[in-house]
Image (cartoon, grey):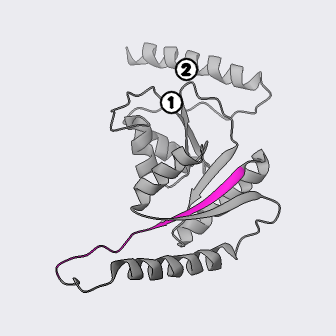
Amino acid sequence: IKSLLQEAVMERLNVIKNKIESKGVRTGKLILEYGAFYDMISQAADNMNANMIIIGSAEKLEDDSFKLGVTAEKIIRKSDKPVWVIKEDIPLNMKNILCPVDFSVHSSRALNNAVTLARRFNAKLTVFNAYKEISTGPLNLTLNLEKENERKKAESEDMFDSFLNKFNLIDLKWEKVIRRGEPAKEILNAIADFGIDLL
């Protein structure tokens, strides 16, 4: 049974490979592994020293907690490689790229890649930062929260400008956006607000 299954899968993979090659794209060897999808995909990417994993996302319901699909979500969490998730029935029309940054080394790598993609696709790049607001607690009742949050905003803007000075953004269509709030929530809001095609 395993042998028959392997033959059927390899036959299907060859059909896909031929279709890709007919579009003028060079392909590598076909890989068939047994095991958990996310483990095997991440391992294959490491073994071939891939620059990126591109994976399709199945159609999901509005209230589904895994918006990208369980396999895609697990690969994103597990893999050391960048993962590009292609959503079903959404054409690749990359006009707006969002790159959230927190001024870390990881952010620098992300922004370098975002700049490269923005140039290649002639897309607008939004470099985004969200800082957490200071909220009151039992030990800081006398704290002037609005004043402290304004100070934190000014501090974040200074750090943002210093961070961006390391990058060549001269020939790009780009903007800098800073918002106050929970970073993950603000990133999701920014995707909707700016009509983002790629995060």
Given residues 23 and 112, the one toward you in this image is 112
Q: Give the quarter of the image for residue 107.
A: bottom right
Q: Is residue 180 magenta?
A: no
> As shown in the figure, which amino acid type bears the numbered disc 1?
Leu
Q: Residue at x 33, y 32 (%)?
A: 63
Q: Is residue 135 magenta?
A: yes
From the image, tell me which residue sits under label 2.
10
Q: Position of residue 100 (x, y in %)?
A: 54, 60
* Residue 66 visible, this angle: yes
Furthest toward the left, the residue is: 138
Mark 2–mark 1 distance (CA, rounded to whole Å): 8 Å
- Report the span colored magenta: 124-138
From the image, tell me which residue sits under label 1.
32
CB atoms of marks 2 and 1 within 8 Å: yes
Q: Position of residue 149 (x, y in %)?
A: 41, 77
The vertical placement of 192 against 6, above or below, is below
